[in-house]
Image (cartoon, rainbow, N blue to C red):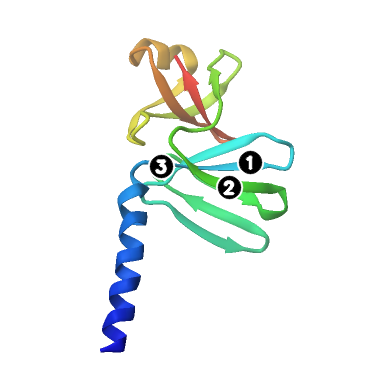
Amino acid sequence: MKKNKIFMLMVSLALPIIASAADYPWLTFKMTDDTELSVASDNLTINYEDGYLHLLSTSAEQSIPVDQIKSMKFTQSPAAVINVTDSISGNAYYYNLSGIMVGHFSSVEDARKALPSGMYIVKTDSKTFKASL
């Protein structure tokens, strides 16, 4: 009987967390240099190995040195928005804000031609960021 009460208490405490998780679709890391990095929390897996957090989600595959993380929190929107400029070169994957990939382009110009104006998550070889086209 006592085990049932403890189990019910644990379930009742967990339900509000599960219900509110959808309200915070991003995990945002504040780095020691005060920059921020966000990854979609949907299907997010985090592994720790050799001083790095290895993150894999629908919008990013990233490794972050633990000693460069100041804090992390779940947020309703990703970190700072930047405008995509033509200085970004090479392959980039574009995701909508739901974390669904909408295109893979070799230049910003190709992305602008193919995608409607709006907000996107852009993943390049060196970083992942929120951008507007």
Q: Is residue 4 above or below residue 41?
A: below
Q: Is residue 111 above or below residue 130?
A: above
Say which quarter of the image contains residue 3.
bottom left
Q: Amino acid at mark 1?
A: Lys
Q: Amino acid at mark 2?
A: Met
- Label number found at residue 30: 1
Q: Nearer the viewer, residue 27 or 89?
A: 27
Classify the position of the N terminus by image quarter: bottom left
Q: CA distance from mark 2 to mark 1?
A: 6 Å
Q: CA distance from mark 3 to mark 2?
A: 13 Å
Q: Amino acid at mark 3?
A: Tyr
Q: Earlier in the sequence, mark 3 or mark 2?
A: 3
- Label number found at residue 104: none
Question: Is label 2 in contact with label 1 (beta carbons under 8 Å)?
Answer: yes
Q: Position of residue 90 (x, y in %)?
A: 54, 25
Question: Residue at the spot x=45%, y=32% of the render?
Answer: 77
State the SS at label 1: strand
Left or right of residue 31, residue 112 in this image: left
> Count of labels shown?
3
Q: Is residue 1 above or below residue 110?
A: below
Q: Nearer the viewer, mark 1 or mark 3?
A: 3
